[in-house]
Image (cartoon, rainbow, N blue to C red):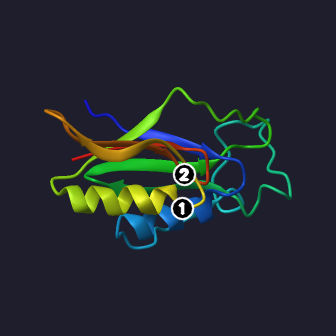
Amino acid sequence: MSFSMSINFKGNCREAVLFYAGIFQQEAPCFLTYAEGDTSFDPNFQVSEDMKDQIMHTSLNIAGTIVEFSDMPDTFEFIRGNSMFLTVTCHEPEKARKVFEQLGENGQTAVPFSQIPGQGWYGMVSDKYQLGWILKA
């Protein structure tokens, strides 16, 4: 058994994934577009012209976990939730601070990255794509 996560975007998946690849020092991944992908899983699924260049699948290794990404098909309602945070734990506080600051560029800090007595370093930030992140060290 294994566990992974998938994160959907509304048309800006490629931009977001390249942003995350830079922060987490990963090579730019391969992107499978809806035009290139196999949609035979559902004969009623039609790829609109607007969706053809959007991302059907890509992934990054973030801190040892494979995270999958895609653009939400336009036949589904897109709702960015606030009930989920991606948590990254770094062994070095300065590395965690750097990632926190990079994710926070044009985003919103909920809890500044700071040392909590007896608990280590902690911060919460939403990035410019409205994804919530918790950084720990």
Identify which residue is drawn at 72% across, 36% down. 78
Most distant residue in the right direction = 49
- Taking the image as shown, residue 49 lies to the left or right of residue 106, namely right
Identify which residue is drawn at 13% across, 33% down. 118
Looking at the rendered image, the disc whose residue lies closer to the viewer, 1 or 2, is 1
Q: x, y percentage for residue 116?
A: 23, 37
- Taking the image as shown, residue 61 lies to the left or right of residue 35, namely left
Quarter location, residue 2: top left
Between 120 and 77, the one nearer to me in the picture: 120
User: Spatial distance from mark 1 to mark 2, Cα to Cα?
Assistant: 7 Å
Q: x, y percentage for residue 135?
A: 33, 46
Identify which residue is drawn at 35% across, 49% down. 66
Tag 1, which secondary structure? loop
Q: Amino acid at mark 1?
A: Glu
Above or below — where is 71 with respect to 44? below
Above or below — where is 25 with respect to 6? below
Disc number placed over residue 105 in the picture, else none: 1
Tag 2, which secondary structure? loop
Between 54 and 98, the one nearer to me in the picture: 98
Q: Amino acid at mark 2?
A: Asp
- Mark 1 surroundings within 10 Å by alpha-carbon count, few (fewer than 14), some (14 through 19), many (20 or more): few
- Mark 2 surroundings within 10 Å by alpha-carbon count, few (fewer than 14), some (14 through 19), many (20 or more): many
Between 108 and 21, the one nearer to me in the picture: 108
Instruction: Pick the quarter of the image with the N terminus.
Output: top left
Identify which residue is drawn at 61% across, 65% down. 15
Q: Which residue is mark 2?
A: 127
CB under 8 Å between discs 1 and 2: yes
Disc number placed over residue 92 in the picture, else none: none
